[in-house]
Each structure stands twice: as structure tokens, then as C-alpha cells.
Amino acid sequence: MSAGKQPRRFTRRGLLAMTSAAGVAAAAGAVGGDAATSMVGGERARQLGGRHVPFDGAHQAGILAPPAANGWFAAFDTRPGITARQVAALMRAWTRDARLLTSGEPVAGDDGMALGHAPSSLTITVGFGASLLRKLNAPVPAELSAIPPFPRDRLDERRSDGDIGVLLAADDAIVVAHALRALTRTARGTAGVRWQMSGFNAVSGVSVAREATPRNLMGQLDGSGNPKPGDPGFEAHVFAGADPVWMRGGSYLVFRRIRMLLDPWDTLSRGRQEQIIGRRKDTGAPLSGGAEFTAFDLDKQNPDGGLAIGPGAHIRQAAPVSNAGATILRKGFSYFDGYRADGTPDAGLLFLAFQKDPRDGFTRIQQRLAMADELSRFIVHESNALFAVPPGTDGHGYLGQGLLDAL
């Protein structure tokens, strides 16, 4: 190295560009149809990996981001005797790291796991549990009241609750794993992982139908009835109001691990499965007619006089009209963790729901589903957590600043 010349700094983004150029050159030197296939596949991968979701904004980005291929959820517990000042220091560090990670840049002490990988639409969403607020002697919002038990719940306390919840989602599993490792390393001495679960969706573009709604392991399009930004009342249903002030623009997140009883489900005919859900399995269209996003008609009758969408159909029981207007923004990831001792699949859905108030959202809906939804016979809720997700940041502040600066 010549005198005075500075060493070149390599970033994940820079390395991606270098490896992309090398890949194009290698493909150009190949022959026949295989070369074209390699170039098309490589270009698609670069486009997918290069997508960047800005970290800063009025709301934490993971709330409204499109479905990602990989979703990991980790709950952290803080060490005994934790102070608001120490939690604030952790949130400053995590905010700093999250801005870098979601931009495809390395963090301090980076382990190199994601070298050559672009951001891949990574989002990092952080929420506070009631247990953390109590440790800090901070008032606990009524919206963080414990979710009541429901019939058929089989909750594992070891995989429930937590002081801090973190949702990490991206289209590249390596990027998600790297981000969790980075946050865990930064938190050492202040907080440690209580439990962690990971799930998946189809990566963008792999479906021949090019459907936007992910399918779950029961084969159903999952999330067709979700509210969308711009819908009347969307923000009023999803985002918190002005009390407490530190949650204005934030949201409350319910997490549930829901195991699907796939073996009994698979014994049902396709027609019976569709009746239980209330939608066609192939298109997601409601049984009252139309396409996937057609508003369903709960009063429509079949020629024999029976209801097109039956009394116990999932979409009937979950509909806002059946629950005094209760509306939640659902996100979810399938999981398949092998087989249980009895030979049945340990598989299902990592269910996430954002809402203004869980008491008038998830809890109200779940109380009805647990009693009247035919689908409830084919699922088991195994873990539960509730977090207050504070608003986003402006590029200079840090997550949870409105709460922590006031303590």
C-alpha cells in the first residue's frame, strides 16, 4: 500500500455490487440456454435482495411492510434491577444498529454472517411488555392488560410474554439471522433472549398465480380480509391514540403461536374445508361469490336455502360485523418444526395482530372464535405475548424515547 493511501472500506452493499458484477461476467462467458437462465435468476435475486424499507418514519416500518419471506420473533428479558437509563441506552444502540442493518450496512463488531447480502426488505420492529414497564415503575396502559384465557388454549409460559419483543422480517433468512445476532450481541449485560421462534412465507414471485396473499399450511390464502391503508377508519383501528402520549402513533401487538392439527384437517374433503373457512381454497374467493377481495355477503343463501357462508365459518365469526366492529391488522408466518413424539406435525402459524386496543380487537374477536368458529377444532394456541409498539423515529431520536426520556 502506498504511503498516505487509505485502506478501502468494504460494506455489505459494496460487496454485493462486486459479487453481482462477477456473476454477470461469469454468466456472459457461459454458452447456450443455461447462460440466459443464470443471468435471469441472478438479476431477479439482486432485485429482490436490493429492496430497502426505510427504518425511520411515523410508524415502525414492520407494521405496514408487505409480507416477507422470513419472519423471526424474539422476546427478551432484562436483567434484575434494570433502570430506565439502561433501557434507554439499549434502545439507542438498537436504533443505531437497526438503521444500519435495514440499509445493508455492517454494525460495530459485525460477525460477517451477512457479507455480500443486501437488505432484502429487512424490518425490525420493537415493542415493550407490561413486565418491563412494571420493572421501570412506569404506568402500564390499560391496552396492555393481560389477555384472558380462552377455551382450548394450551399456553406454554416458557414461550410466552417477555419484557421486550422484537419482530425481524426479510426476504433473506441469512439477513434475519444476522440481524437477530447483532441485536442480541448489543444487548449483552442488559437483556437476553427469553424465547425465539421463526417462520416463513413464499418469497415474492415464486407463485405461478402471482398472488399477493400468502398461503398457510392448511392451503388457504391467509389475510384476504385484512384492512388496508386508505380504508375508512384504518388508522383509527390500527394505531394508538394520544393516551399515553408516548404511544401516539404506535400500535399494540398480539403474538400467538398457533399449532395446526394438520392430520385431522387433511382427512376432510376440500369442500368441507372451504365451508369451515368460508372461502374457496384455490382463489380465496368467499363462498358468497366473487374474487378473493370481493366483500362477502353473510346473508346470501344457496339454492337449497342454506347460508352460502355457514353459521360456524371462520370468516363469518371473525368479521367486524360479527364483533361490534372489531378490526385488527394481521400478519403471519408459517412454521414447521418437525414432528412431535406422537408423530403429528409441529406446524402452524406464528400469528401477529396490530391494533389500537387489544381489548376491543384481538380479545373481542378471539372470545367469539373460541366458542363458535368451526376452525377452532383444528388449531391449538400454544404461546401468547402482548407488546406496546411505540411510534417510529425521525432519524435523530431512538425507539421508545417518548417513554424513557420521561422516566
Image (spheres, helix red, strand yellow):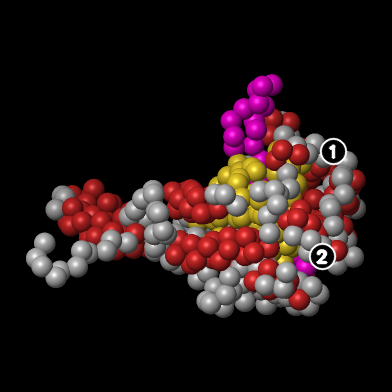
Please tell me in which quadrant of the rendered image residue 139 appears. bottom right
Q: Is mark 2 on a helix, strand or loop?
A: loop
x and y, in percent, of residue 12 in the image: 34, 59
Mark 2 or mark 1, which has the lower sequence index? 2
The residue tagged 2 is 139
Q: Give the range drawn in magenta.
A: 336-357
Q: In this view, does 220 lie to the left or right of 123?
A: right
Instruction: Please give the name of the residue rendered at 9% of the width and 65% of the height, measured from the top-left corner.
Output: 2
Q: Which amino acid does label 2 sit on?
A: Pro
Residue under label 1: 152
The mark lying in front, picked from 2 and 1, is 2
Residue in the image at 87% along x and 45% along y: 149
> Where residue 167 sits: x, y (%)?
60, 55
> Is residue 243 visible to the viewer in this orientation of the structure?
yes
Q: Check if residue 121 falls in the magenta segment.
A: no
356 drawn magenta: yes
Quick one: 290 or 203, which is closer to the camera? 203
Q: Where residue 288 is drawn, which disc sits there?
A: none
